Image (cartoon, grey):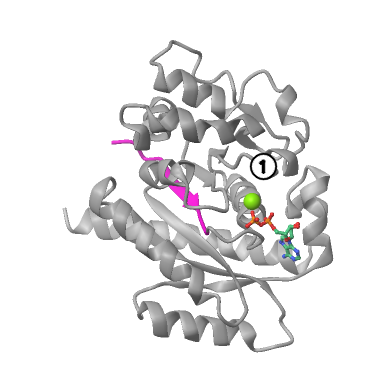
Amino acid sequence: MSNCKVTAICNQKGGVTKTTTTANLGVGLAMEGKKVLLVDIDPQADLTTALGWPDSDALPMTLSDIMEKTIHDEEFGYYDAILKHDEGVDLIPASIELSGMEMSLVNAMSREFTLKSYLGMIKHEYDHIIIDCPPSLSMLTINALAAADSVIVPVQAQYLPAKGMTQLMRTIGKVRKQINPSLKVDGVLLTLADMRTNLARATADILRQQYGSTLKIYKTQIPIAVKAAEISAAGQSIFAYDKGSKVAQAYADFTKEVLADEARAKSKATRSR
Ligand code: ADP
Ligand code: MG
């Protein structure tokens, strides 16, 4: 079995920092010595832009090419699309062409498993693969959830985040039943938190009330900060762009939490064997 863990960063709501979290968790893990691949499966290609490739349509090969070739069972170089970022992470870029993928997938055999089937070819090269999902519960998101071992859900720390969560949890439940029985929800990350208010704590309480005490809410909260918003244009992670800032510290703490959970899960699995 591969030791690579595949995580989807998922929430059908836009603007909850899925992309920012993918980039910074990815670089955070790379800084901890992990081999990391980030996958941009959003046709908006925000992750690709944020990591320094704003003109993704000009790239020779992107995820939509990979998925097309996988659907049609064509031969291709599995590593051809992979870009290398200065901060030690690999990236499979997206482009607007991905928006047409929805139609190609409709008629594809095993359409839910296209991404999983491709990642299966390369995952032995990595410790972590992190997929940045689009803001929808489309077939692209289903492909991400089918390929993933677990999901991390970034949620904006505010009242009423729970509404959209119900739909997401229902989708995850359906995916579990029908296509990926071992899919786990690793946890909810509270983001864009205004540390001067208690809103983050109130949000956590609401989420626990609605989704049960079993839903993990990460201890780390990502504070709201102007500099953090700037990185989407800077091509850098928060660790490079605003080293020593509260947001950089928060993403470092979050990375450690993710690694600690993983170590705990692994030792549990070994003990129960
Ligand atoms: P999503 O991928 O869920 O749509 P993004 O990662 O694109 O969310 O983030 C939404 C917006 O919030 C972007 O403009 C981003 O630059 C900004 N942003 C991300 N993190 C922070 C933060 N900690 N503080 C303030 N703004 C942030
Ligand atoms: Mg995004």
- Looking at this view, name the residue that lies furthest to the top: 75
Residue 51 position by quadrant: top right
- At x 35%, y 79%, the residue is 212
The stretch of residues the image draws in magenta is: 1-11
Q: Position of residue 40 (x, y in %)?
A: 59, 39
Relative depth, front residue between 126 and 233 = 233
Q: Is mark 1 within 8 Å of ligand 2?
A: yes
Q: Is 109 inside the magenta-drawn segment?
A: no
Q: Position of residue 221 (x, y in %)?
A: 61, 73
Relative placement, left or right, of 135 versus 145 is: right
Q: Position of residue 151 (x, y in %)?
A: 44, 56
Going by the numbered disc 1, the residue's amino acid type is Gln
Q: Position of residue 15 (x, y in %)?
A: 66, 61
Q: For the residue carrying disc 1, how many other residues have a C-alpha within 10 Å: few (<14), some (14-19), or many (20+)?
A: some
Q: Which residue is mark 1?
A: 44
Residue 246 position by quadrant: bottom right
- At x 53%, y 58%, the residue is 12
